[in-house]
Image (cartoon, rainbow, N blue to C red):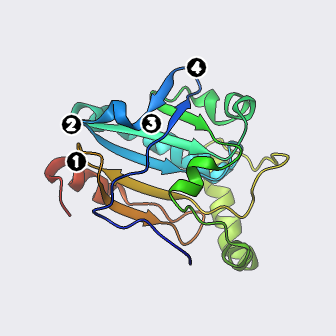
Amino acid sequence: MGIQLQPGTIAPTFQCIDQNGKTISLENFRGKKVLLSFFRFAACALCNLHVHQLIQQYPNWQKQGLEVITFFESPQENIHAHVGSQQAPFALIADPKAEVYDRYYVETSVEKIESIMKDKEKVRSLTAKAEAAGFALTHEAGSNFYRLPAEFLINENGVIDIAHYNQSVEDHLSFEVINQYVNTNSI
């Protein structure tokens, strides 16, 4: 594990284009809480499953002042072909060169991903869960298979309150923690 952003750090800024061609800048979200999620790649079945779960939670979070911004280490056309088909009501951003990933120190780990892949039962279970929700394993040419997701809860002033660097592909910041953050702005 290398460098990681810590709570209390000003969130690195970015300006990107989302799946709808809208310019998304972190500065435009000042005054709102933000869940910033970095996923692996647009065709990742487990990532698509988690986006599906975020879509289900989003209306409640939005009413409470939380916005969601997601990144994928994929080109824009792959966003549209895969995760974009879910019609997410929040920003899906293509970052094929991992420029914003690098600003947030989102980890790539051959060792951690290969360790997960050795646990065949876990892989089968995760695959079955994604496929049951309609997200089949799909190869995405040129994708960074070894990327690990990461999530950040950023406050109204642009400061990171929670930095969650995932230890495996299915490890995400729990909805319980996010809901508590939305409701109390503390954990």
How far from the left and from the top, in percent, is residue 140?
80, 46
Relative height, residue 135 to residue 79 (above, below): below
Eye-nearest disc, 3 or 2: 2
Q: Earlier in the sequence, mark 2 or mark 1?
A: 2
Q: Is mark 2 on a helix, strand or loop?
A: loop
Asked which secondary structure carries label 1, the reply is helix
> Marks 3/4: CA distance?
19 Å
> The N terminus appears in which quarter of the rendering?
bottom right
- Tag 2 and tag 1, C-beta contact below 8 Å: yes
Q: Mark 4 points at which residue?
A: 21
Quick one: SS at disc 3?
helix
- Alpha-carbon span between mark 3 and mark 2: 15 Å
Say which amino acid is labelled 3.
Ile
Image point (50%, 59%), residue name: 150
Residue labelled with disc 2: 64
Q: Distance between the residues labelled 1 and 3?
A: 16 Å
Cα separation, mark 1 vs mark 4, equals 28 Å
At which x and y percent is residue 2? 56, 76
- In the rendered structure, are the residues bearing label 1 and label 4 in contact, judged by CB atoms less than 8 Å apart? no
Of the 4 image quadrants, the one containing the C terminus is bottom left
Q: Provide the residue designation for mark 1.
A: 182
Looking at the rendered image, the disc whose residue lies closer to the viewer, 3 or 4, is: 4
Between circles 2 and 4, the one closer to the viewer is 4
- Indicate which label's residue lies in the foreground, 1 or 4: 4
Crowdedness near tag 3: few (<14), some (14–19) or many (≥20) residues, C-alpha within 10 Å: some
